[in-house]
Image (cartoon, rainbow, N blue to C red):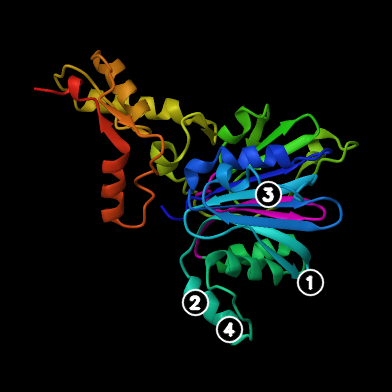
Amino acid sequence: MQDNCGVFGMCSTENCLHDLYYGTFYLQHRGQQYCGLSTYDGRQIKLRTHKGLMRPSFADDMAGLDGYSGIGHVSLNVRQPIKLNSRVGEFSVCFSGNIANLDELVAEFKAEGHSFAAVDEIEVLGKLIASGKNIVDGIGRAAKAIQGCYSLLILAQDGVYAARGPKGHRPLVLGRRGHTVAVASESCAFNNLGIQIVRDVKPGEIVRLRSEIDLLQSEQFETLKVIKSKVIQYCAFEWVYIANAASIIDGRCVDVVRQRIGASLARRYPVKADLVAAVPNSGIGHAIGYAQEADIPYDRVFLRYDYADRSYTQSTQQEREREAQIKLIPITEKIKG
């Protein structure tokens, strides 16, 4: 679960910092330990990261970050984005995913004389991209070298690049509002910003986002390459747990999927019960679906304490159990024998 981060990117004909901040904030459920923003104002790529949540970290710390394009990231384990200056130019990069062969790739880089500020996945990914002839070639090299899964965003002077792993494991969706174009791990980041879903990034697709005012809509999202895979492996856990219930992933509404799972469970395992209750928040849709199919009243038995972290995203089982105990408050009047 440590690899399920949130990425958000945007290009606009106007200053997009405010929307970039909120778009990234609406992915907070995908990572609560670190957050970061990187923007381009036509002159330079700027970067700022924090340890902590988006709102308290950036609410009073966005001065100097104005830009017409940018990327944002929320994470459970490492600061992102990072910025590199290489032969493909200056760029910043962030990703959601994992590199299973990280140690092997680090050893190869060290053998070639490379050094590391910190041995982590995002730095290795950045070096792989920087080794290409250009950004698209670099992403292709990374896709070939990496054993694992990813969705990544790159901020460069000529736009925002979005790439989804060839197996489609991590979601990535494109959106538009007038001359503003956006990309995100989940469409819930679009809803309150008035951004409409255009389509999902296809598995293996590399797309460049641009927002020049004279561009045709078809030119705002330019498919630069598609890296083929023999198999597609969507992550079912996105619909079951990770994603926000309001999101639409690969054409399927998360909340509707959860209710259908609950209804299927009721048909397969019917019970006699006084009520059906959810373990919030991700269990709510499942419980409603079960209750509707079984014709049993749905009621609240647990309340989720708003200031607790997500439990399953913790690093160890002990931490998960502790966080679950912290976040769930029983309504004792409804469960007394």
Tell which circle, 1 or 4, labels the residue nearer the N-terminal end: 1
| Residue at the disc numbered 1 | 87
Q: Residue furthest front?
A: 60
Please report the residue visible at 52 percent of the width from the left and 47 percent of the height from the top. 53
* Boundaries of the magenta span: 147-171
Asked whether residue 328 appears in the rendered view, the answer is yes
Q: Position of residue 198 (x, y in %)?
A: 67, 32
Secondary structure predominantly adopted by residues drawn in magenta: strand
Quarter assignment of residue 305: top left
Tell which circle, 4 or 2, labels the residue nearer the N-terminal end: 2
Asked whether residue 209 appears in the rendered view, the answer is no
Please report the residue visible at 67 percent of the width from the left and 66 percent of the height from the top. 129
Give amino acid for label 1: Arg
Callout 1 touching callout 3 (CB < 8 Å): no
Label ID, residue 71 = 3
Q: Position of residue 136 (x, y in %)?
A: 73, 60
Give how far apart the Cα atoms at labels 1 and 2 are. Answer: 24 Å
Give how far apart the Cα atoms at labels 4 and 3 are. Answer: 29 Å
Mark 3 vs mark 2, foreground winner is 3
Please report the residue visible at 86 percent of the width from the left and 56 percent of the height from the top. 43
| Residue at the disc numbered 4 | 110
- Badge 1 marks a residue whose secondary structure is loop
Give amino acid for label 2: Glu
